[in-house]
Amino acid sequence: MMLIVDTNIMFSYFKQQSPTHSIFEELQIGLFAPQFALAELGKHASQIRVKADIDKDKFNKIKKRLITIVEFVPESEYRTELKKASKIASDLNDIDFFALALRLDLAIWSNDKAFKKQEKVIVFNTSEIIRLLRFE
């Protein structure tokens, strides 16, 4: 299975007892995200550290591991889909995720309910991913 992974899902990866962390680490799935999502992780580092109850060193260690799991794709590789994506994304911050999903013809993993308010790209939340992976 291969999926586009939303930034908020990556935020959950930092909490090591989370189902998201286990999915990333234990299952053989291909994960992709827009390159800018990596910068978002850094931008929200202090918030992530508080929620995950980790210090700066642990955050950096987990982030390095995340970079080996998720393939971060530069905008130049999905730029052709941005116009289409802008018509289906309800939030401007989500356009790149939809554009990448259209470009790679993949579903998106997101717990953001707004992602499901369109019919062009399949979107799974974490509970759905867990159910799907149990049966594969």
Image (spheres, rainbow, N blue to C red):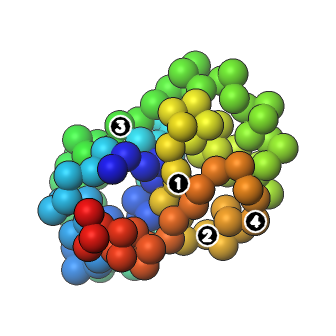
Identify which residue, 134 or 109, lies in the foreground.
Answer: 134
In the rendered structure, which amino acid carries the disc numbered 3?
Glu
Give residue 43's position: percent from left, percent from top. 51, 53
Give residue 72's position: percent from left, percent from top. 41, 36
Contact, mark 1 vs mark 4 (Cβ under 8 Å): no
Identify which residue, 44 or 36, lies in the foreground.
Answer: 36
In the rendered structure, which amino acid carries the disc numbered 2?
Asp
Give the mark nearest the N terminus, 3 or 2. Answer: 3
User: Residue at 51% across / 65% down in the picture?
Assistant: 124
Q: Nearer the viewer, mark 3 or mark 1?
A: 1
In the rendered structure, which amino acid carries the disc numbered 4?
Lys
Whole-Å distance between the Cαs marked 3 and 2?
Answer: 21 Å
Give the mark nearest the N terminus, 4 or 3. Answer: 3
Whole-Å distance between the Cαs marked 2 and 1?
Answer: 10 Å
Residue 117, label in figure: 4
- How many C-alpha atoms fall within 10 Å of the one at disc 3: few (<14), some, or many (≥20)? some
Single out the residue that lies furthest toward the left: 26
Contact, mark 3 vs mark 2 (Cβ under 8 Å): no
Q: Is residue 86 visible?
A: yes
Residue indicated by mark 3:
71
Which type of secondary structure does the marked residue at label 1 adopt?
Answer: strand
Give the mark nearest the N terminus, 1 or 4. Answer: 1
Residue indicated by mark 1:
108
Give residue 35's position: percent from left, percent from top. 48, 35
Whole-Å distance between the Cαs marked 2 and 4?
Answer: 10 Å
Give residue 118's position: percent from left, percent from top. 75, 59
In the rendered structure, which amino acid carries the disc numbered 1?
Ile
Residue 112, label in figure: 2
Q: Nearer the viewer, mark 4 or mark 3?
A: 4
- How many C-alpha atoms fall within 10 Å of the one at disc 4: few (<14), some, or many (≥20)? few
For residue 54, side relative to residue 130 (left or right): left
For residue 90, side relative to residue 80 (left or right): right
